[in-house]
Image (cartoon, grey):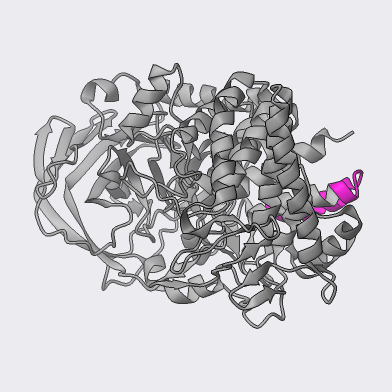
């Protein structure tokens, strides 16, 4: 089943420009939230790039430990060939010319370098569940001396690259093993490194600093010059019969040496083969199988939150959550619930879906689930009006796939409490308007819907009032509760839910229809009255399992959405021609946030549109396939094998934002499985 993925070559360096080598990225994760990532050229261009970003316990969070490597080959005859690029401050940058190919094998990155007759292949993996990275080098066509210079910068992965770094690190060395300690942060574990291979040696030079330039940080308006520390270099002799592996880790030496490099490689490939084999039959080949491996990178054990793990184990569970996006997002309630079906149910990981849902049940507070967990913190932030309503949808999809009535029965009292809080009103002015039964929300200074850009106190799209998708989600939640309560024999409560749902339905169809545009208002009873802006949020009134919009209006809404919002890589967040429309997402932080939901295309929205379209045209697979075809080329465009968070609103729809986004991957995979499963 995995052969197509093993042999896939999505990107060839032979015909690519230097700019493409610097802007295309790769990502490897460890199931804990830690990762390794960089540009294909080997140049660290972002603050988030590094060969070991470790997921460390609260309050530390994810931390850059090993920034990057200087990599050279000393060839017979004295020639020196640089493998990976390094962009140093105040020096002219020269791209190494020996990189000839980059590819993914089972989702793992492989580089091929040609230096004369010598060919070197480099592979990177992170053993699952460890803050460890393996960099493996193999040679053919001759022999060469490999030289590796580790560049170290102990800092939180969100800290700017110029974060104070003036002290020399403390060093313990024995043979080819090294332990590096931060002198300024005693909470950090040591970075342990060793080079395994023939004639492996460690050459210490007393430690020194080098200054590097991070070009993407400069383009985004952030500090772009940073200092790293190097203790010296490793070297080993590469021969066709003997490969070598650099191991860097925050784990103990016993854990590091528990798996040889060969065993670690075999174990990880076997794990990935099982991921594909256990996925839906419609997801075991081609593009869908690639996305199964991409989905795996977002499902993590929340290693930093010890209480979650302890509570889950006590209940016979394992703690699981979803990283919303790499590199800078943590786990978000909204993203988790939207992504759950694609990431876990389409991939055959129902048990982990259950773990995720039961974990979030523990965090229900005042009728809400957390919007997000900040980096390195145990307490969630609850400023969201829709994440909790998506929780109902995610539970419904899980029960449909798993038949787990035990979890549902455990959840029902919590869900009743959620509904009651919404009916009488809860935090952030979230509550039902008794005059019409519609759900309102909004509080000054807070961004409560998924259109949540905020910069320096400016909420870009506040949408305070009665938002269209919030009421679509609320109606869906009420109908789900009605069904679940009837199935559990509670007819009285089910009847109450039905009454609230019917009132919501009647008011929605009376209030949200805008005859001037032939679609729906985005917000009614807002601060400036009813908002006629044409946004994708109206599609949820059709796409959800219990659509709140009367069926006779579906076609008009979808025609407007298809004409003005649909692109090859998702849906625009605002129709062209609107006064606030922004065609490009670029510039400094304020400029980017001003465009974030004002036209910028969101990949995940392809999923809801596909659902809505198939409700109106149940057999039209061709239109849905065209809707997601654009993502095929994108898998080789930004982060190889992944789907970006957002795209510019106009051709060529340049990818922006996070290079790997959970709900983008989840929704495209879900649609692929759905269409492939249609008869």
Q: Residue at x 71, y 22 (%)?
A: 489
Q: Position of residue 360 (x, y in %)?
A: 48, 36
- Looking at the picture, tell me which residue is in the foreground, 627 or 434: 434
Residue 376 lies left or right of residue 35; in this view the side is: left
Give the residue furthest to the bottom: 579
Q: For residue 383, say whether it is visible.
A: yes
Asked if the stretch drawn in magenta spans residue 622, the answer is yes
Rendered position, 220 above or below 144: below
Kindly report the secondary structure that dominates the magenta region of the rendered protein: helix
Q: Residue at x 40, y 37 (%)?
A: 142
Number of marks drawn? 0
Q: For residue 641, say whether it is visible.
A: no
- Looking at the picture, tell me which residue is in the foreground, 16 or 192: 192
Asked if the stretch drawn in magenta spans residue 469, the answer is no
Q: Residue at x 34, y 24 (%)?
A: 310
Rendered position, 522 above or below 146: below
Q: Residue at x 63, y 76 (%)?
A: 583
Q: Position of residue 591 (x, y in %)?
A: 48, 77
Quadrant location of residue 626? Answer: bottom right
- Looking at the picture, tell me which residue is in the foreground, 46 or 421: 421
| Quarter that holds the C terminus | top right
Rendered position, 578 above or below 119: below
- Looking at the picture, tell me which residue is in the foreground, 85 or 169: 169
Residue 292 lies left or right of residue 427; in this view the side is: right
Q: Position of residue 515 (x, y in %)?
A: 85, 73
Q: Which residues are magenta?
A: 615-631
| Quarter that holds the N terminus | top right
Q: Position of residue 280 (x, y in %)?
A: 70, 28
């Amino acid at each position: 089943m995995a052969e197509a993925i093993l042999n896939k070559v999505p990107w060839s360096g032979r015909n690519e420009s230097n700019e493409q080598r610097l802007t295309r990225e790769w990502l490897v994760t460890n199931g804990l939230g830690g990762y390794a990532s960089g540009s294909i050229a080997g140049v660290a261009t972002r603050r988030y790039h590094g060969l070991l970003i470790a997921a460390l316990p609260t309050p530390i969070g994810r931390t850059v430990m090993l920034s990057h490597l200087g990599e050279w080959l000393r060839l017979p005859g004295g020639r020196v060939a640089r493998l990976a690029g390094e962009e140093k401050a105040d020096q002219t940058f020269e791209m190494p010319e020996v990189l000839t190919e980059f590819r993914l094998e089972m989702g793992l990155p492989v580089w091929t370098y040609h230096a004369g007759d010598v060919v070197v292949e480099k592979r990177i993996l992170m053993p699952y569940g460890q803050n460890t990275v393996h960099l493996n080098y193999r040679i053919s066509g001759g022999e060469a001396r490999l030289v590796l210079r580790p560049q170290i910068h102990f800092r939180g992965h969100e800290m700017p690259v110029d974060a104070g770094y003036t002290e020399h690190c403390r060093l313990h060395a024995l043979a080819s093993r090294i332990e590096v300690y931060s002198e300024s942060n005693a909470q950090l574990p040591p970075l342990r490194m060793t080079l395994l291979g023939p004639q492996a040696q460690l050459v210490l030079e007393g430690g020194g600093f080098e200054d590097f330039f991070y070009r993407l940080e400069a383009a985004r308006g952030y500090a772009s010059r940073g200092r790293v520390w190097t203790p010296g270099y490793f070297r080993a002799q590469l021969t066709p019969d003997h490969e070598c592996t650099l191991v860097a880790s925050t784990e103990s030496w016993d854990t590091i040496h528990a798996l040889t490099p060969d065993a670690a490689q075999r174990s990880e490939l076997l794990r990935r083969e099982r991921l594909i084999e256990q996925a839906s039959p419609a997801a075991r080949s081609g593009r869908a199988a690639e996305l199964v491996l991409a989905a795996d990178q977002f499902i993590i054990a929340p290693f930093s939150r010890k209480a979650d793990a302890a509570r889950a184990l006590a209940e016979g569970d394992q703690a699981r959550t979803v990283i919303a996006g790499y590199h800078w997002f943590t786990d978000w309630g909204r993203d988790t619930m939207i992504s759950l079906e694609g990431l876990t149910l389409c991939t055959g990981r129902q048990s982990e879906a259950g773990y995720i849902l039961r974990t979030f049940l523990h965090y229900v507070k005042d009728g809400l689930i957390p919007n997000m967990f900040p980096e390195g913190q145990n307490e969630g932030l609850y400023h969201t009006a829709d994440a909790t309503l998506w929780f109902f949808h995610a539970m419904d999809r899980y029960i449909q796939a798993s038949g787990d009535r035990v979890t549902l029965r455990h959840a029902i009292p919590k869900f009743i409490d959620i509904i009651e809080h919404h009916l009488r009103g809860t935090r952030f002015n979230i509550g039902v308007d008794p005059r019409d039964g519609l759900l309102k929300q909004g509080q000054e200074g807070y961004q409560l819907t998924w259109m949540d850009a905020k910069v320096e106190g400016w909420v870009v799209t506040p949408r305070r009032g009665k938002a269209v998708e919030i009421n679509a989600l609320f109606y869906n939640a009420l109908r789900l509760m009605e069904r679940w309560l009837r199935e559990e024999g509670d007819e009285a409560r089910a009847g109450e839910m039905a009454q609230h749902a019917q009132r919501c339905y009647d008011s929605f169809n009376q209030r949200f229809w805008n005859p001037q545009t032939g679609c729906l208002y985005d917000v009614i009873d807002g601060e400036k009255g009813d908002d006629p802006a044409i946004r994708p949020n109206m599609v949820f009134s059709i796409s959800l399992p219990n659509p709140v919009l009367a069926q006779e209006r579906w076609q008009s809404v979808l025609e407007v959405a298809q004409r003005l919002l649909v692109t090859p890589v998702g849906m625009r967040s605002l129709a062209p021609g609107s006064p606030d429309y922004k065609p490009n997402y670029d510039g400094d932080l304020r400029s980017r946030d001003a465009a974030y939901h004002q036209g910028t295309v969101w990949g995940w929205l392809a999923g809801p549109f596909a659902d809505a379209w198939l409700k109106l045209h149940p057999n039209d697979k061709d239109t849905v396939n065209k809707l997601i075809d654009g993502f095929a080329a994108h898998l080789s465009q930004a982060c190889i094998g992944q789907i970006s968070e957002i795209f510019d609103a106009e051709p060529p729809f340049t990818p922006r934002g996070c290079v790997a986004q959970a709900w983008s991957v989840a929704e495209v995979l879900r649609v692929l499985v759905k269409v492939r499963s249609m008869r």
